[in-house]
Image: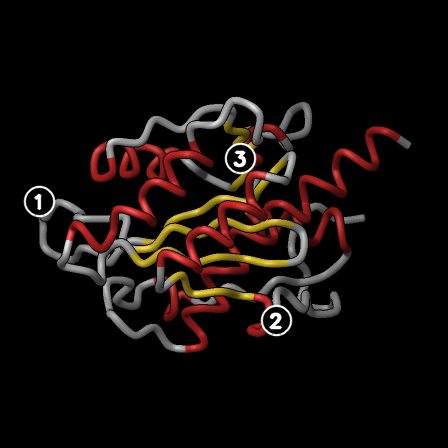
Amino acid sequence: MSATPDDSLPPYDGVKLSDVVLVKTAADAAAALAALAASDAVGFDTESKPTFAKGEESTGPHLVQLAVDERAWLFQIGARQDVAALAPFIEVLRTVLESETILKVGFGLGDDLRRVRAKLGIEPRNVLDLSTALRRRGERNPLGAKTAVARFFGQQMQKSKRITTTNWALPRLSEKQILYAADDAHVALRVYRRWRAQDAA
């Protein structure tokens, strides 16, 4: 099978909106923690409002995404001005991301990790960056989610540049933003599961 995305491949369906939870309350955060802490591995990603001016520093992450096999949670960090209101959410993120027993998997996590450290004071542990872990011998470039989906599922993942560069700090995200963000974390976990299953076969 080709390792590069191919327009002739069937589309990758991705996560459903009904399986995505926007964490809005302390109860939402507690429910998320219960599910995430029970998983051996979670998909992980962040989104940040893009910067366009030369020398402008990112204030991200504005959104942190975590996913288990059947659900994804979106934590809006940049939309809230009240730091105290963020405390339950940040504690969930700290517990999961700093856990030595929960594996965090994602694609191209360098910037995500740096921003989480700088903005939230969280030091992620037990992290696997699939962009390098899945590189085959002789491949120099990091592997992206689209290429991984083509390789492991024989499907084409649509990633809209227009959605990528939207404002992730908005208090109300669009359905397209929600699905895009949730997919980034969820697909990483799905690829990881398929990769490990193939290795075990």
Q: Disc 1 versus disc 3: distance between alpha carbons?
A: 31 Å
Q: Mark 1 Cα within 10 Å, few/some/many (few <14, many 20+)?
A: few
According to the picture, the residue beneath numbered tag 1 turns out to be 55
Check residue 16 in the rendering and tell me which mark sits there, or answer none.
Answer: 2
- Give whichever of discs 1 and 3 has the lower sequence position: 1
Q: Disc 2 versus disc 1: distance between alpha carbons?
A: 38 Å
Q: Secondary structure at mark 3?
A: strand
Q: Secondary structure at mark 2?
A: loop
Which tag is nearer the camera, tag 1 or tag 3?
A: 3
Provide residue 125's location: percent of width, then percent of height: 45, 24
The type of residue carrying mark 3 is Lys
Task: For the residues labelled 2 and 3, say whether their Cβ atoms are less than 8 Å apart.
Answer: no
The type of residue carrying mark 2 is Lys
Check residue 82 in the rendering and tell me which mark sits there, or answer none.
Answer: none
Q: Nearer the viewer, residue 110 or 142?
A: 110
Q: Residue at x 8, y 44 (%)?
A: 55
Which tag is nearer the camera, tag 2 or tag 1?
A: 2
The type of residue carrying mark 1 is Gly
Provide residue 84's location: percent of width, then percent of height: 18, 50
Q: Secondary structure at mark 1?
A: loop
Q: Residue at x 25, y 38 (%)?
A: 120
Check residue 104 in the rendering and tell me which mark sits there, or answer none.
Answer: 3
Check the picture and name the quadrant holding the C terminus: top right
Q: Disc 2 versus disc 3: distance between alpha carbons?
A: 21 Å
Residue closest to the far front: 27
Provide residue 10's location: percent of width, then percent of height: 75, 69
Q: Residue at x 41, y 70 (%)?
A: 177
Q: Nearer the viewer, residue 126 or 98?
A: 98
